[in-house]
Amino acid sequence: MTEQIFRDSNTDLAHRARWWTGRIAVYGALVLWAIICLFPIYWTITTSFKMAPDVMKGNMVPWWDFSPKWLGWKSLGLSPDTIGAGSTVRDEFLKRFYNSAVTSVTSSALAVVLGSLAAYGLSRFSYRFGYMKNSDISFFFLSQLILPPVVLALPFLVLYRSLALLDTQIGLILLYTLTVLPIVIWIMRDQFAGIPTELEEAALVDGLSIWGAFVSIVLPIALPGMVAAFILSLVLTWNEYFFAALLTSTHANTLPVMVASQTGSQGISWWSMAALSFAAILPLIVIGIVLERYIIKGMAAGAVK
Amino acid sequence: MIIEAGGQPPAFLRLSMGQALANEGDLLHVVTNDNISTRRIAFGRAIVWGSAAVLALTGLTQTLQETGLAGFGYSNWRPTLYAYILWAVCLCWSQVLIRGEQGKRTLFVLPAALFVISMVVFPLLFGLVIAFSDWNLSSPTGRTFNGLDNIRQMWRDPFYWNALTNMVWYSLAILVEYAIAFGLALLLNSQIRARKFFRVAFLMPLMLSPVAVSWMIGKSMMEVRFGPVARLARELGWEQPSFFGSPELARASIMIMDAWTFIPFMMIMILAGLQAIPKEVQEAAKVDGANAWRGFWEVTFPLMLPVSITAILIRIIFKLKLADIIITVTSGGPGGATDSVTSFIFREYRDRSNVGYGTLLAMVYLVLIVIAMTILMKIAERWMRPQY
């Protein structure tokens, strides 16, 4: 064998080795964290198909160390053989699901409407309410972020009691709107600031009113931002537990309250809890996968500017 | 209120306001010829004052009934609420009627402002009244003013002070979360395949409801006998894993679960910041002979400082609301070791249904938060001010 004449020098080979270890370290870290993020979801799905002995033994891989059964879903009334029959648990679940959907969608929509209007006004005109100028008004809105919910909770409990709004969807919707409004304003102000005012000026010259220009010119451009704000609000309101636990009891309970109320009673039937939890988080998992782009856009809005 | 924390909006808010506020004055110049007839103005004034009168009248009659001086057959305070809404609508409408074009501009901000004021300022003032009274919702006696008794009770309440110290610990955990989030953001920003998959996977925890998370992880996976985390701990040589046995461990477990949910939040913000840094900066550093380590500490990290501080401040704000996980997993135990202020007040209300004491605790908490956040923002602002 003759010695190879043209070859990588030793320093280059060392470089290659370092490159490979670097790659392995990067992907190792990525995969490790992906497992940390996804394993609890996997655990919940599989547990909902386990029987008691499988749970106790801690079996993890379906069809390999345990055979999946519809046990958890049967107790929820959502398994194939119970889906046709009537089920009180399922009715309860669907009612809570409906409550969650109504409160979160309505409050997010309301917050996006109110917040977008305010953000647009603040990004285009200069106001003066008494001594407050634009920056003060902006800060007034954004400072609501700092307000912890517990400060409002008990006064609202008392107020709602005398307004007969306790345990109603409207009561929750109003509070949820309030909690996400600063976030919406933050995202939307950033959106509107990025839209050149020449567009509206042209529209005004062509005879549109301020509101006409806003609706027909600015809104379509700002729509992605509004979607981002809406989704982010949806996530926050769907998951909200504190106000719901405090202000609702029987009619307007949302899903998190139902999930939380199951844990204590009659020992824990792991499979049905897993089924319930998974059903509660499923909508957001779907949203997260499909609309990930918007969520990231929404959260990134405040960071960079 | 919290609006006036030092006159000027703090750094992280002002930074994000961008150039929109750098030049005060209308960005959109509109010249309109408003011909507003005096009758229109009069009508505008009339509806505002008319609806205000309706509101005052309803409120007055309801107060009279409440104090037992006269009966009007109200079953609750709804009529006053409706009158208030009517007044708010009339106020918005009258802006356009009276001030024309200028009023139409006000209409952008007015609804949101009215909403926030009626939902925050009014309940806060009402809360101040409740905070200095003894009010057991289940007892028939109703509210009795008890002066400073609640404050004295708070002063002697070791569990409240314990919850406050816990909040300090929980907030300090943010530094670790920040380090992890920064690392993950760097990984996602580097040259990798399947970036989209990893981004979605890393984002997942944020989407999940904390209550479901606390069941999935806290109750199920950390279950001492068969939970996978306990198994892993046993494999690693921890004989008797118990995650909520001792106060320190329980606190750490709560911190880890909360971190799991919120690390994606910081990660996304930092990632956005990293992507906004032009590539040329790093290349220039490389040309100048900086290795990756120094390139990071002397170029990337300083450039990321504003974003980092924004992310950390917002994360602190979210952390101060921490309650769901604690309520559902440990309900404050063992012995109040994991209590956050929110979960403590929640239990306090659940156990004794005393609104007054709980409200006072919450008010004190709010004051402490505002002070702490103001100081933090001042420090952050001073630190970020360019020094050259």
Image (cartoon, coloured by chain):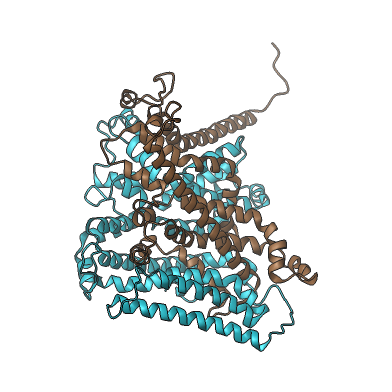
Residue B14 higher or lower than A42, as above or below: below
Please give left or right for residue B145 compared with residue A147 in the image: left
Residue B379 higher or lower than B324, as above or below: below
For the N terminus of chain A, which image quadrant? Answer: top right
- Say how many tags the image has: 0
Please give the name of the residue rendered at 65% of the width and 89% of the height, measured from the top-left corner.
B38
Q: Is residue B24 visible?
A: no
Of residues A97 and A220, the one nearer the viewer is A97
Colour displayed for chain A in the image of the structure: brown
Residue A264 higher or lower than B98, as above or below: above
Residue A124 horizontal/vertical position (percent): 66, 71
Q: Is residue B160 visible?
A: yes
Colour displayed for chain B in the image of the structure: cyan
Residue A97 horizontal/vertical position (percent): 45, 44
Please give the name of the residue rendered at 78% of the width and 71% of the height, measured from the top-left corner.
A207
Pick out the residue farthest to the bottom. B38
Please give left or right for residue A64 compared with residue B384 in the image: left
Residue A61 horizontal/vertical position (percent): 43, 23
Residue A128 horizontal/vertical position (percent): 58, 80
Please give the name of the residue rendered at 60% of the width and 41% of the height, measured from the top-left corner.
B190
